[in-house]
Image (tube, rainbow, N blue to C red):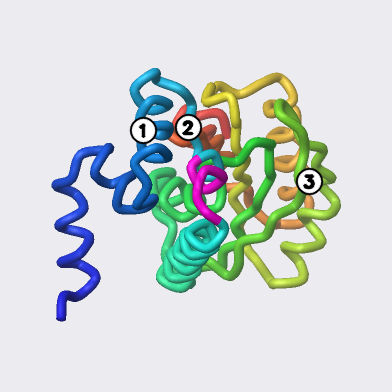
Amino acid sequence: MKDLFEICGECRHLSDAEVVYQLTNNKETSNQVNAMLANGSNVSIEDICNLLTPARREMALAVIELYKRIKERKNNYKRITSSADVYEVMLPYMADLKVEECWVIFLNQAARIIRKQRISVGGLASTQVDVRVILHEALSCNATTMILCHNHPSGNFQPSKDDDRLTHALLEAGRIMNIRLLDHVIVTDESYYSYGDEGRL
């Protein structure tokens, strides 16, 4: 019996069309998805799942959810040493989102993850964040440091003026409470922006 790594290895050698057909088992649906991909459309997992039959859609969503949970367990107590680590940890939560979400990673003194917390959900271009809520969560789990993280559904990872203001507000509030803001990472499906890497903290 083949294990998961052998199966995944085989899938990597398939073309987009072949992968889609494996998922849909339907030529017409496969052609629809391939046309979307060929046209350079911003195709999300949700878009593809919506084209599946109810049974296959449930199966696909279950596999995606299981993958996220496995990644979450793997990343529990992971030591964060760079912005790349933050991106790796948070991308499974933020990939393909249609609206902005703000999360915070709370860390202990050894820079290991205590927990990841979604703070707010917003619209297409912004989300309202209360700094007091973040500090309350940090205190409740005895975090010594924290990393702010949110997504830009547009794909543009450059920070906005609102992003700058939030970063500054949390940085200053954290100093008062002796909880250090290590970074603010803006996530897109393809890349990320790190305030820490840019020397802005």
**Which region of the structure is painted magenta?**
48-53
Horizontal relation, residue 15 to residue 24: left or right = left
Q: Secondary structure at mark 1?
A: helix
Give the residue at mark 3: 173
Query: How many numbered marks, from 0 up?
Result: 3
Q: Secondary structure at mark 2?
A: loop
Give the residue at mark 2: 43
Disc 2 to disc 3, how far (Cα)?
A: 39 Å
Q: Is residue 50 visible?
A: yes
Q: Nearer the viewer, residue 40 or 87?
A: 40
Q: Nearer the viewer, residue 6 or 74?
A: 6
The stretch drawn in magenta includes residue 33: no
Give the residue at mark 1: 31
What residue is drawn where x is 24% and y is 44%? 18
Above or below, comparing residue 102 to residue 104 in the picture: above
Q: Are marks 2 and 3 in contact (CB under 8 Å)?
A: no
Type of secondary structure dominating the magenta stretch = loop
Number of residues whose C-alpha sits closer than 10 Å to that of mark 1, classed few (under 14), some (14–19) or many (20 or more): some
Of callouts 2 and 1, the N-terminal one: 1
Q: Is residue 190 visible?
A: no
What residue is drawn where x is 69% and y is 29%? 163
> Could you say which quadrant of the image residue 146 lies in?
bottom right
Number of residues whose C-alpha sits closer than 10 Å to that of mark 2, classed few (under 14), some (14–19) or many (20 or more): few
Q: Nearer the viewer, residue 74 or 80?
A: 74
- Label 2 sits on what residue type? Val
Of callouts 3 and 1, the N-terminal one: 1
- Label 1 sits on what residue type? Asn
Disc 2 to disc 1, how far (Cα)?
A: 14 Å
